[in-house]
Image: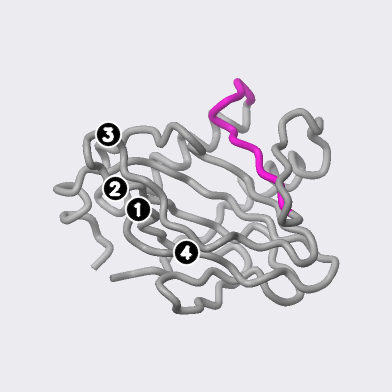
Amino acid sequence: MLVQLPFKLDPGIKKNILDFVSSSDASYWVNNTLNRKYCILNRYNLPLTFLLKEYSSNIFSQLNITKQTEEEIFGNFIGVHNENGFVLSHIDSKNIYGWEHVRINFLVNKPKEGGMPIINNELFKIEEDCSWLNLASKWKHTSTPVVGDTLRIVLSLGAFVSPAELHEAKIY
């Protein structure tokens, strides 16, 4: 099973994300207790929302996943972690039809240390602008804490995918 994917973040998408993170109104962001915040873009009618929906569709289709449905809770989101920020270990839910929660993540901004994904107890070293797959409803996942004052910024593209289509995807 592929975890690290061959996709590199489009430079134009990266610039749009970094601009949004640095200049967007605080009302777009949800803060939580672990030195992190996130913006669920699907909730807003922003140019970036539509740009990332198109980008997501393109990336998923390159994996032969073309019939996905929107993951309704987080959809496509941007996550930002400050020093000591990390993702708590968890497994996400499938949808009501038993479709798998699939995420394709891009490391938009790499911290000096930490911020690396851990999937099924395996640490993956991801470089800036690189991507990884998370079968979020199958695999337990977390991340290492960010060390230093450089933010960890992640673009997470989410969808529900039928088990049949996932079986045919280019992830094995």
In this figure, which residue is indicated by the disc labeled 2? Answer: 100
Residue 141, labelled with which disc?
Answer: 4
Q: Secondary structure at mark 1?
A: loop
Residues under numbered marks 1 and 2 in contact, where contact means CB atoms less than 8 Å apart = yes
Q: Which mark is residue 73?
A: none
Q: Amino acid at mark 1?
A: Ser
Whether 99 is drawn above or below 129: the answer is: above
Q: Is residue 105 above or below residue 42?
A: below
State yes or no: residue 63 in magenta.
Answer: no
Residue at 44%, 44% (x, y): give it.
158
Determine which residue is flagged by label 3: 96
What is the spatial separation of the Cα atoms under label 2 and label 3, in whole angstroms? 10 Å
Element class at badge 3? loop
Image side of residue 156 versus residue 17, left or right: left
Cβ atoms under marks 1 and 4 closer than 8 Å: no
What's the amino acid at mark 2? Glu
Residues marked 2 and 3 touching at CB (< 8 Å):
no
Quadrant where the N terminus is found in the figure: bottom left
Percent position (x, y) of residue 164?
Answer: 14, 48
Residue at figure coordinates x 66%, y 43% from the top left: 38
Q: CA distance from mark 1 to mark 4?
A: 10 Å
Q: Which residues are magenta?
A: 36-46
Label 4 SS: strand
Residue highlighted by disc 1: 137
Q: Secondary structure at mark 2?
A: strand
- Residue at mark 1 to residue at mark 2: CA–CA distance: 6 Å
Asked whether the beta carbons under mark 4 and mark 2 sit within 8 Å of each other, the answer is no
The image quadrant that residue 19 belongs to is: top right
